């Protein structure tokens, strides 16, 4: 309850900066600040709220995944935390509360739209600066729509994307306008890709001073992620390689010196940063997939059973309590995510030497040097499974596991996921191809949009 109370307080505090409520999207539109100069718009994009990861402060989508075991869940589930954990149809029936995920995405989109609508008329600055800020707003908006389409749209299927519904594509910052109908998944992805491509020519070459802001590499990295989740693997690899070639970001070496600050804005491995606070109870099955010499375990996970992983509830992903400088988790793009995209695409196309090289570039920075041996195999499926494993370990609690479960389920690679109460009784299941892999439109949104089609 203490944790839930903190989350609720954060949501309330986050809403206080938004004085008016959009009755159509159920968001809290950003403020009454008058934007008139280029400097105003630049500072607008420095808003710390835009740097928060999706589902903040902790990253709600992590509760959907097979990495979590919430031993002390209330039965029957009642709180938003409980209901996300058991894949509830809705996470709150309170029509006066902002809907989880949906409201924060559209609130940020509203901020980015304010830049896109007003920057051309701003005073001061140069045309180049205006184009750069517009590029950053397009990139930021595209990332928010990527999250929305992977939360409220079905897992990507090239045969049905022109019929499957996603979310409304909103380009206005006028909260009194009626929300447009839900776009198809294909339409949303088309908008995302067009926005990022329009942004790239004008994005700054370097965002090292503040990695929450856009950059050329950030644009490439978002395209890599987008193409990866649509199954366009050739383009995903191409843009991942471009992201790595155009960034100053490098892998963080767990065998070496770790950061002294928890800030994501200047962490060396971040390409396009967003953050949540790491705090999740880890499942025994997930923890048992780590090797005994994996440095991530004792640097990121608190444990009370001597790291034997035999006691439910004994292990939590909570870096604050073991390595405080790593307490914030980057839900944005990173060097390691780009390497893992390249590795998976290479494994899928039987370019095994490339896949193994990318695995090595990550693991040598995560496994104790004294015992590290590069992974080797000449079997395509074995290498692909190893890439899946490493992606699961390295990107744990970044929010991407839920999206990975969705895409792997489409390939019949996901078994049934179970939820247990404190006594070990099964209280919920997520079988293969379940409708629960797609979130329902929040009831708060439907209450103002009764004609909007609900997901199954």
Image: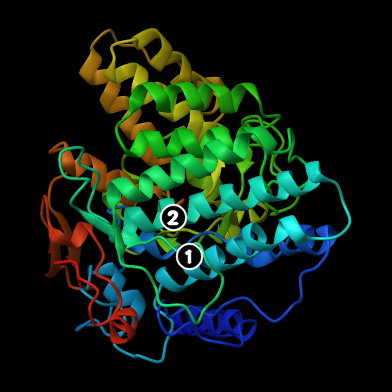
In the rendered image, is residue 279 in sight? yes
Asked whether the beta carbons under mark 2 and mark 1 sit within 8 Å of each other, the answer is yes
Location of the C terminus (image quadrant)? bottom left
Comparing 364 with 160, the one in front is: 160
Q: Which residue is mark 1?
A: 105
The answer to which quarter of the image holds residue 128 is: top right
In the rendered image, is residue 71 in sight? no
Display coloring:
rainbow
Relative to 37, say whether 198 is above or below: above
Location of the N terminus (image quadrant)? bottom left
Relative to 12, say whether 240 is above or below: above
Comparing 331 with 295, the one in front is: 331
Q: In the picture provided, is 251 more to the left or to the right than 163?
A: right
Comparing 119 with 421, the one in front is: 119
Taking the view exactly as shown, the residue that stands out farthest to the front is 121
Which secondary structure, mark 2? helix
Count of numbered badges drawn on the protein? 2
């Amino acid at each position: 309850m203490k944790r839930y109370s903190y989350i609720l307080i954060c949501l309330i505090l986050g809403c206080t900066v938004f004085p008016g409520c959009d009755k159509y999207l159920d968001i809290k539109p950003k403020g009454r600040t008058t934007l008139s100069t280029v400097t105003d718009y630049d500072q607008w994009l420095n808003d710390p709220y835009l740097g928060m990861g999706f589902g903040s402060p902790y990253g709600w989508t992590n509760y959907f995944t097979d990495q979590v075991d919430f031993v002390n869940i209330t039965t029957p589930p009642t709180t938003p935390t409980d209901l996300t954990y058991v894949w509830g149809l809705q996470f709150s029936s309170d029509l006066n509360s902002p809907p989880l995920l949906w409201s924060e995405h559209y609130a940020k989109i509203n901020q980015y739209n304010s830049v896109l609508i007003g920057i051309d008329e701003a005073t001061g600055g140069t045309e180049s600066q205006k184009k750069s800020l517009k590029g950053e707003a397009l990139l930021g908006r595209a990332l928010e729509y990527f999250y929305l389409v992977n939360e409220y749209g079905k897992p990507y299927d090239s045969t049905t994307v022109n019929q499957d519904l996603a979310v409304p594509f909103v380009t206005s910052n006028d909260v009194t306008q009626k929300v447009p109908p839900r776009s198809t998944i294909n339409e949303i992805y088309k908008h995302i890709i067009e926005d990022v491509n329009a942004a790239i020519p004008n994005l700054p070459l370097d965002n090292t001073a503040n990695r929450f802001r856009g950059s050329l590499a950030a644009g490439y990295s978002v395209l890599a992620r987008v193409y990866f989740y649509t199954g366009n693997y050739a383009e995903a690899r191409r843009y991942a390689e471009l992201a790595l070639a155009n960034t100053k970001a490098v892998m963080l070496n767990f065998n070496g010196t770790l950061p002294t600050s928890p800030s994501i804005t200047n962490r060396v491995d971040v390409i396009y940063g967003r953050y949540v606070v790491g705090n999740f109870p880890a499942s025994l099955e997930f923890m048992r997939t780590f090797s005994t010499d994996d440095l991530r375990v004792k640097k990121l996970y608190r444990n009370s059973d001597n790291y034997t992983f035999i006691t439910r509830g004994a292990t939590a992903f909570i870096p604050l309590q073991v390595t405080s400088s790593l307490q914030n988790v980057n839900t944005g793009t990173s060097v390691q995510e780009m390497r893992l995209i390249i590795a998976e695409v290479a494994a899928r196309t039987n370019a095994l030497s490339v896949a193994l090289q990318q695995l090595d570039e990550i693991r040598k920075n995560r496994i104790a040097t004294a015992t590290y041996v590069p992974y080797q195999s000449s079997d395509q499926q074995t290498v692909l499974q190893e890439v899946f494993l490493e992606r699961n370990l390295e990107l744990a609690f970044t929010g991407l596991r839920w999206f990975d479960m969705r895409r792997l389920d489409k390939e019949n690679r996901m078994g049934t996921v179970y939820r247990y109460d404190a006594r070990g009784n099964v209280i919920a299941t997520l079988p293969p191809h379940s409708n629960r892999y797609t979130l329902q439109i929040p009831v708060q949104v439907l209450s103002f949009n009764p004609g909007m089609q609900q997901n199954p």
